[in-house]
Image (cartoon, helix red, strand yellow):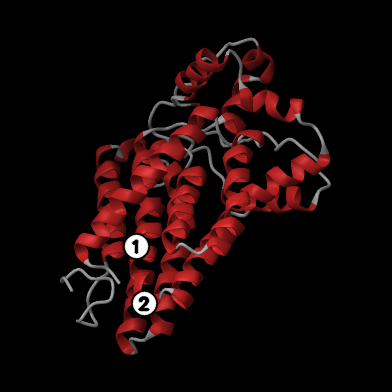
Amino acid sequence: MSANSQQPKTKSQIWAAEWVIISYIVFTLILMACRWDRLVNPAGMLWLRGCLLLAMGVLWLIYCWRPCKLTRLIRVTGLMILLSWFYSDTYEVNRVLPNLDHVFASWEQQLFGCQPSLLFSQVCPWGWFSELMCLGYVSYFPLMVTILLYYFLRRYEEFGMASFVLISSFFVYYFVFVILPVTGPQFYYLAVGTDKIAAGIFPDLGNWFLTHSERMAAPGWSDGFWYHMLDITHDAGERPTAAFPSSHVGVTTVMMLLACHTRNKTLVFSMLPFFLLMCFSTVYIYAHYVIDAIAGLLTGVVVYWVLRLWAKKMELR
């Protein structure tokens, strides 16, 4: 077993996934230093990074105090919980850069001759369809729990690999999001006006999202249970950031490939419907352009195999 193994010989060793997180924090600190005068809340951003490093330190101490399966699971779970804070923070970093939605909306128009995200809910207006789309989108976190628990309970010898691949895949996308400021239709369409979008007018908004974070309400059956769950999810952490590529599609692709790696047909076929719903729902609810979803699917495959090879090289268990 190598020195960087996820199940280290030395109790005090930092895990490979934690090194990825630390590298991401250093990367964003460098970007912050370069754009310090334009940041909206630099002191708060520094405080957040200090708190996140402290939380990681506490998880490390708990595991060092009593290294076992339970504290290992607590440590991995804690890192997964921290992901939501890192996601919201991508907005704090990338909103100082000029918005690029006009470029992506124009590409969408050139490829499809329309804006599929704007039309999808109009073509499929049924309440039951809306609920399926919302269910697919909010299944994101339950799918993470499912795949990690399966590896922990049934394939513990590969739990380190699975947790490394899953956690690190998020940060691959976060690296992209902080330097590629695309908000997605729910923010861009509202800022421009759907009448202009329908007419094929895609203005450059420049630094509009530096001070604006209003979004369109998701389409569909607003009285539906899963619609309300989607609304709660969006209110809790959605920001005008992280549209290209779709990390929802990308990370769910990674999870599906982790499921396929187990060769457990029950696991694969139980996750497959939610994966398919996810690919369509991101466009249906205005979260992404179609090109975002396609890029998420393609990059998800690449990210999975690169991280799997990296995990294999480090002999993660």
Pick the front one: 243 or 98: 243
Q: x, y percentage for residue 47? A: 37, 59
Work out whether residue 220 can be spotted.
yes
Residue 285: quarter of image = top right
The answer to whether 6 is drawn above or below residue 63 in the figure is above
Which is closer to the viewer, label 2 or label 1? 1
Q: Is residue 216 left or right of residue 36?
A: right
Q: Is residue 252 left or right of residue 200?
A: left
Along the viewing direction, whichever of 52 and 72 lies nearer the viewer = 72
Element assignment for label 1? helix
**Could you tell me how far apart the alpha carbons at marks 2 and 1 are, in whole angstroms?**
19 Å
Q: Is residue 48 visible?
A: no
Which residue corresponds to the image point at 57% horizontal and 37% vertical from the top-left? 213
The residue indicated by pointer 1 is 164
Q: Position of residue 244 (x, y in %)?
A: 45, 34
> On the picture, is 105 further left or further right than 257?
right
Q: Position of residue 210 (x, y in %)?
A: 47, 33
Q: Residue at x 72, y 46 (%)?
A: 132
In the image, residue 99 sits, relative to residue 219, either above or below, namely above
Label of residue 58 in the image: 2
Structural crowding at the residue carrying mark 2, measured as other residues with C-alpha within 10 Å and reported as few (<14), some (14–19) or many (≥20): some
